[in-house]
Image (cartoon, rainbow, N blue to C red):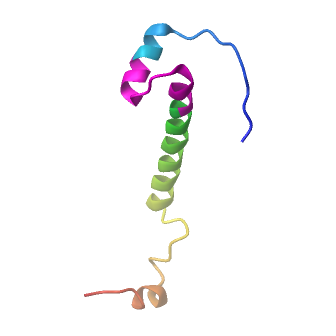
Amino acid sequence: MSNRKTSVLIDEELLVAVKAVLNTKTVKDTIERAFLEVLRAKAREEEVEALSIQKGMELNDDEVMSRAWRH
């Protein structure tokens, strides 16, 4: 992973609020956690979409379902 040093103006009230939500202490930690949360949210959104259209699943395939574990 590479790092990038930058200078940005950040709304202090927004930073304090996000720090509280993410339970972080530093600006760097807060920004990194916020970035990760955005990526996780996107991954969840994509997973929900895949599940809703059964992408990559063979639930309608009788042969596959006949081998499914059942009680």
Outermost front residue? 25
Query: In the visual, does 6 lie left or right of 33?
Result: right
Q: Position of residue 6 (x, y in %)?
A: 71, 18
**Labels in figure, total:** 0
Q: Position of residue 16 (x, y in %)?
A: 42, 15
Outermost left residue? 71
Specify the quadrant of the image occupied by residue 14.
top left
Name the residue at 42% across, 22% down.
Answer: 19
Name the residue at 65% across, 12% down.
Answer: 8
Q: Position of residue 61 (x, y in %)?
A: 48, 83
Give the quarter of the figure containing the C terminus.
bottom left
Query: With respect to residue 56, does 1 lie above or below?
Result: above
Give the quarter of the figure containing the N terminus.
top right
Name the residue at 48% across, 66% down.
Answer: 54
Q: Position of residue 68 (x, y in %)?
A: 39, 86
- Main SS category, magenta section: helix
In this view of the protein, which residue sits in the foreground, 51 or 21?
21
Query: With respect to residue 46, does 63 lie above or below?
Result: below
User: Is residue 62 found inside the magenta-colored segment of the image?
Assistant: no
Query: With respect to residue 32, does 13 lie above or below?
Result: above
Name the residue at 50% across, 77% down.
Answer: 58
**Which residues, given as a range, are shown in magenta?**
17-32
